[in-house]
Every structure is written in structure tokens, then in C-alpha cells.
Image: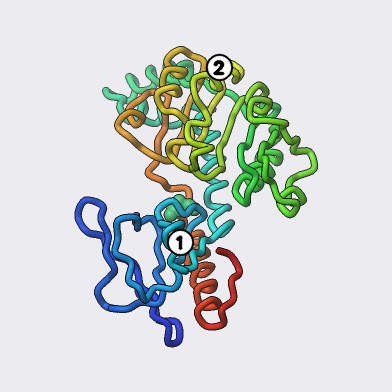
Amino acid sequence: MFKIQTLNNISVVGLERLPRDRYEIASEIAHPDAILVRSAKMHDMDIPESVQAIGRAGAGTNNVPVAEMTKRGVAVFNAPGANANAVKELVLAGMLLSARNIAQAWQFSRDLQGDDAAINEAVEAGKKRFAGFELPGRTLGVVGLGAIGVKVANAARALGMHVIGYDPTITVQRAWQLASDVKQALSIDDLLTRADFVTFHVPLTEQTRHMINAERIRILPKGAILLNFSRQGILDDEAVIAALDSGQLYAYCCDFPSNRLKDHPRIVTLPHLGASTREAEDNCAIMVADQIRDYLEDGNISNS
Ligand code: MLT
């Protein structure tokens, strides 16, 4: 259940979660002017005719029927950049925990049994088994140089990594925000041939679905690490699993658990935590609420 807020005389309504991942308009307001939504899937919902604007408290808008709403004249707003720092921090954590086998080593430590002498003995085995590698001098490929990709690229430079970015539609404003020593690749394949780590910050569209498949994984240097804190479906999970099993990939860290991925020993999955910090949640909510207020009160569109 999302909070219901009233901005002056404008009624903004949240969505109520029903069983089996369905949602409906929270019943307190019969004819809302706007809906604020985070992750609820709105495609099968009855969206009242009174709705003039939908605010998605996040970067992506996959859960909103944007084309249908646009035809109806409903403005759809998102919150680009508002959660970028939160996602960046989790990507950095993902790189570190993949390179240092932290999740596997933690599980190993939790499973240790016996007295402290037995545990100390096992520590020696753990040190060898989970030895990792360091980031400085390694190359990170960043696919998608929007607000999040740029932050990840700059942070990786600060950690001593080489960084190559790829984005065929990078804006001049974003290009200026990139650290001067972030190189731009000519194509996705050009980036993949040179990257020890690759992180994806693109929306899921027909063009990006399975953008990383078996063929592209073969281009990567052996032992590369993939990180997906964007959307499930950008990488072909089966191809990733096969490449982990063959040793072509070293690790995969992604923000979407699934039955196929969650138990694999070289995959760390998280429950879509990228934007889940207090700061990011506040920033997103404030950004979309401001946009909706500007639109409904003054007709201004700052982003849609
Ligand atoms: C986003 O699109 O920014 C994220 O999916 C936000 C979220 O986790 O709600």
C-alpha cells in the first residue's frame, strides 16, 4: 500500500497490492487526478478516466502502460537520476563481492561446524578457496551512460580501474559529466573485447533484450564478471549459466533472483535492491510528486 497524499486540491493516489501480484487503486479516493507508483505492474489495471498523470518513482517505466496512457493524453513522469547514487553504490558492492567471493565465503563461514580449533583449520582452506583479485588496473565496461552509468564509471575510475563506456545515444550533458579518462567504445562488441567487468545501465526494450547472448559472451576476456542492476532480460540467463559452468565467466551478480539463477554457486542475486535506500526512495518520491504538482497546477512538463 502506497501513501496517499493530497497536494493542495489535487488528489494523488497510491496502489494497493492484491494477492498474486495484482494491484488496484487504493479505495480512499474515487477519482484521482494522478497516481504515484513504484514497482506495481499497472498493465492490467483499470486506470480511472480522471487520471491525468502517472508518476513512476524510479528510472524505468516498464511497469506503466506508457503507450496506452500517452494515447489517452495521460502524462507519465519518471525520476531519472534520483536513485542513481544508490544504484552506483550497489554496483560497486557487486564488483567487490564478485571479485573477492564474499557471498560464497560468508556462506562457507556460516556453515563451519566444530570447535574453534576445527574452525581455525577450516579458515586456512577458506583462504585458498576464496582468494580473489583486486580492482585497480582492471577494466570496467559500462553499457549505458545515463545518470547511473556515468556515476558508476566515475566511481570506478576513483578506484583505479580503467573504464570504457558505450552508449549510442549519450547526451552532451552526460558526456561532460564523465571523468575525462573514461574512454568511449565504438560498439558493444568493441567494449566487450576489452572488459574484465561489464555493468549494464540500459532499459529493457526490444533492442536490449538478450543483448548479451552466448555469442557476445565468447567475445569477453576469459574470466570476466557481469553485473546487471538494470532489468532482467538484458542478459540471456541460460547463456550466462553455460559460460559460468565452462569457466568463460568468473561470476555474475544481478539484482533479480529467479529459480534458475539463485542457487548457482557463481551467481549472487539480490531482490532488486539497487534503489532501496532511504535517500533514493525520498528523492524519487519528491521528484515525481514535484513534477505532477507542476503539471496539474501549472501545466508545466519538466520530464515525461
Ligand atoms: C528504477 O527503475 O529506478 C528501479 O527499478 C526503481 C525501484 O526499484 O523501484
Q: Is residue 102 above or below residue 292?
A: above
Q: Please indicate whether residue 168 sits to the left or right of residue 256 in the image.
A: right
Some atom of ligand 1 lies within 8 Å of the CB belonging to the residue at label 2: no
Q: Which residue is more in the foreground, 209 or 134?
A: 209
Q: Amino acid at mark 2?
A: Arg
Residue drawn where x is 56% and y is 42% of the image: 201
In the image shown, does 247 or 291 lie closer to the viewer? 291
Q: Which residue is mark 2?
A: 218
Q: Quadrant of residue 52?
A: bottom left
Q: Which residue is mark 1?
A: 56
The location of residue 226, given as percent across then percent down, is: 52, 29
Please indicate, yes or no, whether residue 205 appears anywhere in the rendered image.
Answer: yes
Residue at image coords 51%, 20%: 249
User: Label 1, label 2: how many angstroms apart (C-alpha)?
Assistant: 37 Å
Q: Is residue 264 left or right of residue 172?
A: left
Q: In x, y percent, where is residue 208?
A: 52, 37
